[in-house]
Image (cartoon, coloured by chain):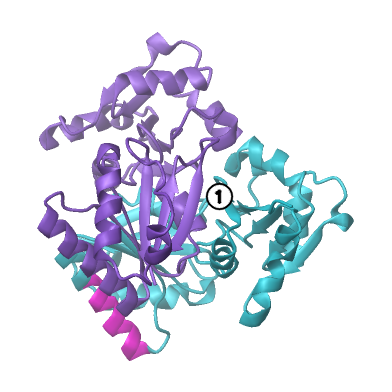
Chain colours: A cyan, B purple
Amino acid sequence: MSLGILYLFPGPLSETEIEIVLPKHNIDLIKTIKHFIAEDAKTARRFLKLCAYPNIQDAEIALLNEHTESNTVGSLLEPLLKGHNVGLMSDAGCPGIADPGAEVVKLAHKKGIRVLPWVGPSSIVLTIMASGFNGQNFAFNGYLPIEKDKRVKRIKELELFAVKHKQAQYFIETPYRNTQLFADLLASLNPSTQLCLGINLTDAAQQVITKSVSEWKNIKAPEIHKIPAVFGIYF
Amino acid sequence: MSLGILYLFPGPLSETEIEIVLPKHNIDLIKTIKHFIAEDAKTARRFLKLCAYPNIQDAEIALLNEHTESNTVGSLLEPLLKGHNVGLMSDAGCPGIADPGAEVVKLAHKKGIRVLPWVGPSSIVLTIMASGFNGQNFAFNGYLPIEKDKRVKRIKELELFAVKHKQAQYFIETPYRNTQLFADLLASLNPSTQLCLGINLTDAAQQVITKSVSEWKNIKAPEIHKIPAVFGIYF
């Protein structure tokens, strides 16, 4: 019996209409899948509803999130081993990018299961596109440390690395700490360093703004408290 | 007079139908734009044709590529300063990612022009999603050095950095040198290092395969000569 395919389905980042952020193909394909892996069942069902999935109650949604014991991740592959295709979904954005999905993808490769990624939104990727920073050399660093001293040290390390290696540095924060991170960046970075903010990506209110630290200090701070944002620095 | 908006339009990577890789929204929006910036006029017109752009001969396509003098990039913004929206297109994939577009985006930010990125395919992003590597920490390094000694040194540096900082490392090569790069990777990397190949992304023949270097050595090498590919390493 042949193995199923693990499809990676990006999900919407905002309340924007789904036709704005996903190719029609994904919406059609997702309707043909019965088995899903998702971070959160409620978010997954909402996404299926947006795709006009025919019988949402029949979709089998297995969970992969911070509560999943690593020794149980293998069981998520069972439908694939029985020949069923499985859709891996992200709560928001692309599976495998700043998302727990990478763990099951890794195991799929070990089992020789075919992994097929589909096009969709990622706030990180959209910010990288629109920052105006070096697009030939960039890094995404996930979350910075929360503890003040360690965070400031890390910000300065990333700034130095960006200059030394001409590598743009991107990172994120839990939205309710965005304002604090922005303040820490303005206080710690060199005035001439360029700071990019990608805010509310794919939403009607989306903005990607790049300014030097000294320019940011001279204007009203953007509203980013509890709002999804991606941060980037370059010189 | 208000400034125009600089829209970033990803373009197809393969001969695949456009509905597979682009949201309907992009295809509708692109038809409303008259001014474009592209790497190559012929590729740009082919893309407009795929979008069923009404009068391709009326589209004004300004070029931004390796032949563009950096002191003339500013002139590309002229329609924006006159209030017209401009579409920045990539030859393949996302503008601003491994593409000369970043230069004009940078200038747009300096002039206070709004930059709006739209969703679309990127072989680099699709490979990152499907590699199974760390999705919280990764870097894209562009092209590796061509000269043998420098290239091997760089491969080993990236491998060491990946292990030390838990940062997955991605890079690309000119397609006609892919086979040589793959051979250099197998010869230079530790046998236990994981090597990911993203091949022919979005095409019907697309594959993303992750195996250890020792596993790759034991199987027939994939066909990547003159075929678009993205390489990734992790441990």
Q: Is residue A169 visible?
A: yes
In the figure, A170 relative to A28: above or below? below
Q: Amino acid at mark 1?
A: Pro
Please provide percent x and percent y for residue B146.
15, 49
Please provide percent x and percent y for residue A51.
74, 45
Query: What stretch of residues is rendered in magenta?
Result: A148-159
Q: Which residue is mark 1?
A: A117
Q: Nearer the viewer, residue A12 or B78?
A: A12
Give the residue drawn at x 60%, y 67%.
A104
Please provide percent x and percent y for residue B230.
37, 49
Magenta stretch: dominant SS?
helix
Q: Is residue A220 visible?
A: no
Asked whether B99 falls inside the magenta stretch, the response is no
* Residue count near mark 1 (Cα–Cα under 10 Å), binned few <14, some 14–19, many ≥20: many
In the figure, B17 relative to B235: above or below? above
Please provide percent x and percent y for residue B86.
37, 30
In the figure, A126 relative to A44: above or below? above
